[in-house]
Amino acid sequence: MTQSIYNIPLKTIKGSETNLEKYKGKVLIIVNTASKCGLTPQYEGLEKLYEQNKEKDFEILGFPANNFMEQEPASDEEIEQFCSINYQVSFPLFSKISVAGENKHPLYNYLIEAEPQRIGGKEFEEKLHSFNITTNPVPEVLWNFEKFIIGKDGKVAARFSPDTTADNPELLKVLETELAK
């Protein structure tokens, strides 16, 4: 496992080399996103949560991924425009990465190893299976919009299933607990 979540090389949605160092000491929600998914409207709730808490050492970091039924086929530029125009997303977005499979980005290797179990998602997984959609086995990311909450200490505090919305009481409780530390 990488020593720290903060030193994993990343790219911004604009293509600049970066890492998560500037978010050290903040509570983070790291979420894999897609613009052509049934869960895409979650951008709205995530943006609302971000607006309500961004002054409290909090960030939401979006990582577009095309791993699930190719629901994020767009370029970084197109993704950024889509999020801005349709959901007024102001939280940071990063360059499209892979969150599953052989080409899984080191960030997601780190997150999954740190927290192999997600909270919730059984019914969502069963729904996907009812449509004959094969899902990844645990501990892999189930689908678009899976959420990892990172505490101010840089450790994964919780992992929530894709169908867990930004206003979910359990997610908000973990967030409030981490912000209070």
Image (tube, rainbow, N blue to C red):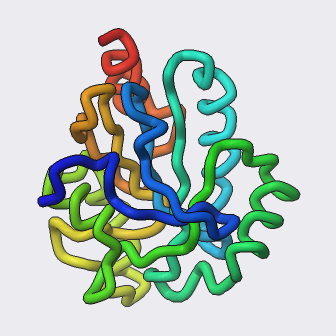
Q: Residue at x 35, y 53 (%)?
A: 161
* Residue 109: % across, % down: 23, 67
Name the quarter where the C terminus is drawn.
top left
- Residue that protrudes farthest toward the front in the picture: 17
Q: In which quarter of the image is residue 103?
A: bottom left
* Residue 39: % across, % down: 57, 61
Compared with 167, 139 (above or below) is: below
Compared with 180, 118 (above or below) is: below
Compared with 158, 7 (above or below) is: below
Q: Along the horizontal axis of the image, is 142 left or right of 157?
A: right
Name the quarter where the N terminus is drawn.
bottom left
Q: Quadrant of residue 132?
A: bottom left
Q: Do we see residue 154 in this rendering?
A: yes
- All told, the count of numbered labels is 0
Q: Which of 144 and 90 is in front in this view?
A: 90
Q: Residue at x 38, y 33 (%)?
A: 24
Q: Do we see residue 39 in this rendering?
A: no
* Residue 41: % across, % down: 67, 55
Q: Residue at x 23, y 52 (%)?
A: 118
Q: Nearer the viewer, residue 171 or 8?
A: 8
- Residue that protrudes farthest toward the right in the picture: 85
* Residue 153: % across, % down: 25, 28
